[in-house]
Image (cartoon, rainbow, N blue to C red):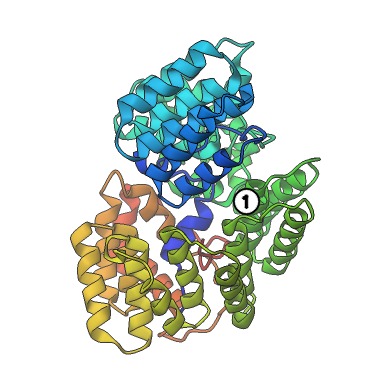
């Protein structure tokens, strides 16, 4: 079987990045829409940062600043790029000083968002949260400059640190109608957190009302299966979601509402495609993706790699492995420089579309791939399919050594280590940091692409794992399993 029920399930169902912490100095997220660029050196600096050439980026920013002709907007962007490059090299104090000084001299929305972004990259999520909470009602629109991934990273870090600011920030974001730069509604993952806050405040009626706005597969799955939300299971508005067709109808309602928006960005198209794939309509996901790619090209832009990959995975959902492989190979031809993470994603698509040899060749181009959990997972699965047991076993050992639970669980399943995967999933249910991943994995999601019972099939192994006595007996302490009408076989 190709790429990815477990990791893929999470990438789809956690499409809003619930589990993706943005608080990493090596990957500081952009704070908002980048201002118009008039200086070629700044464009080159941004590309250098994306490619990991942070020293080159600093030199290019210095070259642009030395001209003395930067507009105020370009000056804002130059300060952010410099801070981002500094943060990526570990110079966190200096990075913060750069954006704070820029905001002092030129107070505006972009520079404010840059400060929050770099604080998060420096691991100072408490301070970032304080800046957001410090906004009054009139200025709260500034928060929409912060991308969803950045906001999720701040919330994830506050949760991990059991910060008292976590609930206050969640409440402020929902009641202040935070949407992010391109959204039209409060992200489901944040609203679901708010539902939890209301339950802890013993306000179940208000919590039940909030669930009416949830439309993403991940939110609906957790709402119906996680014990955190069990007080709501008796409410008619939640109970009726278990009726035949109700969940798919709720997801479809959200898709249609998003399509009516006058402007959609790349991230919007991506979320819509993932939702369509979840409810078994990959053909529509392909049409949406190709339309989005065409719009980007007609505007002389470049379609995002994530969007291209999503089209490839939708082709694979349809059983058109040849089209998925073509998508991967077109990306290889069109992009001169491929970051390591993107190479792993392309290898993942190749492995899923039955090109195991191509997947291994792609992984071989990644320097130091033994440190990337995703690469090790793809390597284990592809090597297993090709009968290269030594390479498979080495990848499994490395995954165990680095403790990459999600990737290891997938690798154990795709290589037929069912008992080990079962024991691992049971253990993950008791790990606070892995519980949500385990809860999402331990659902009997519908397999729309391969309804057969071939015991070698990955989906069959996953369903057998979830239905095992060990997993089912471990579930009541944490939640329940349901036969949900979503497909888990959806990688990035």
Residue occupying image coordinates x 43% and y 65%: 344
Residue occupying image coordinates x 22% and y 58%: 402
Would residue 448 be visible to someone looking at this image?
no
Give whichever of 203, 138 is nearer the camera: 138
Instruction: Indicate left or right for 60 with 175 as reference.
Output: left
Residue 33, given in percent of the width and then of the height, sits at 62, 35
Give whichever of 183, 479 is nearer the camera: 183
Residue occupying image coordinates x 45% and y 67%: 5
Residue 46, given in percent of the width and then of the height, sits at 52, 43
408 to 154, vertically: above or below: below
91 to 271, vertically: above or below: above
Residue occupying image coordinates x 65% and y 57%: 273
Give whichever of 102, 456 is nearer the camera: 102
Say which residue label 1 marks: 271
Residue 87, given in percent of the width and then of the height, sits at 36, 35
Q: Quadrant of the N terminus?
A: bottom left
Assign a secondary structure to mark 1.
helix
203 to 429, vertically: above or below: above
Instruction: Indicate left or right for 282 with 88 as reference.
Output: right
Would residue 378 be visible to someone looking at this image?
yes
When asked about the image quadrant of residue 74, the answer is: top right
Residue 4, given in percent of the width and then of the height, sits at 45, 69
When asked about the image quadrant of residue 294, the answer is: bottom right
Give whichever of 258, 225 is nearer the camera: 258
Q: Residues within 10 Å of mark 1 (few under 14, many from 20)?
A: many
Q: Residue furthest front?
A: 67
């Amino acid at each position: 079987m190709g790429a990815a029920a477990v990791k893929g399930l999470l990438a789809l169902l956690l499409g809003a990045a619930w589990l993706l912490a943005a608080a990493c100095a090596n990957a500081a997220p952009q704070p908002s829409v980048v201002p118009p660029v008039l200086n070629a050196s700044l464009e080159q600096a941004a590309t250098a940062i994306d490619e990991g050439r942070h020293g080159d980026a600093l030199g290019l920013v210095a070259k642009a600043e030395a001209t003395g002709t930067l507009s105020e907007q370009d000056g804002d962007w130059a300060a952010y790029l410099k801070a981002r490059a500094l943060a990526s090299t570990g110079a966190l104090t200096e990075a913060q000083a750069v954006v704070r000084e820029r905001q002092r001299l030129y107070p505006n929305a972009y520079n404010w968002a840059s400060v929050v972004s770099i604080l998060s990259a420096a691991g100072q999520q408490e301070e970032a949260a304080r800046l957001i909470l410090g906004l009054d009602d009139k200025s709260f629109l500034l928060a929409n400059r912060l991308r969803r991934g950045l906001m999720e990273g701040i919330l994830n870090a506050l949760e991990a640190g059991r910060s008292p600011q976590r609930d206050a920030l969640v409440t402020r974001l929902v009641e202040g109608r935070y949407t992010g730069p391109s959204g039209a509604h409060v992200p489901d993952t944040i609203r679901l957190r708010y539902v939890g806050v209301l339950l802890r405040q013993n306000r179940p009626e208000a919590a039940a009302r909030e669930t009416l706005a949830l439309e993403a597969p991940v939110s609906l799955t957790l709402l119906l299966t996680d014990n955190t939300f069990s007080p709501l299971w008796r409410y008619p508005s939640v109970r009726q979601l278990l009726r035949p067709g109700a969940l798919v109808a709720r997801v479809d309602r959200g898709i249609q509402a998003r399509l009516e928006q006058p402007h959609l960005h790349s991230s919007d198209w991506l979320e819509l495609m993932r939702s369509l794939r979840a409810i078994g309509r990959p053909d529509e996901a392909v049409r949406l993706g190709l339309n989005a790619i065409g719009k980007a090209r007609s505007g002389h832009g470049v379609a995002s790699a994530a969007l291209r990959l999503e089209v490839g995975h939708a082709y694979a959902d349809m059983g058109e492995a040849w089209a998925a492989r073509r998508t991967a190979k077109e990306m290889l031809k069109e992009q001169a420089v491929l970051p390591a993470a993107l190479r792993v994603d392309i290898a993942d698509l190749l492995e899923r579309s039955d090109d195991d040899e191509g997947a291994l060749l792609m992984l071989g181009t990644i320097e130091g791939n033994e440190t990337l959990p995703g690469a090790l997972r793809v390597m284990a699965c592809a090597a297993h399919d090709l009968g290269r047991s030594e390479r498979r076993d080495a990848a499994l050992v490395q995954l165990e050594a680095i403790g990459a639970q999600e990737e290891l669980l997938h690798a154990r399943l795709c290589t037929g280590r069912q008992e080990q995967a079962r024991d691992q999933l049971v253990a993950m249910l008791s790990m606070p940091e892995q519980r949500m991943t385990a809860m999402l994995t331990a659902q009997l999601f519908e397999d729309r692409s391969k309804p057969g019972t071939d015991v070698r099939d990955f989906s069959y192994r996953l369903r057998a794992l979830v239905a095992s006595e060990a997993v089912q007996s471990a579930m009541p302490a944490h939640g329940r399993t349901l036969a949900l009408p979503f497909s888990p076989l959806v990688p990035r």
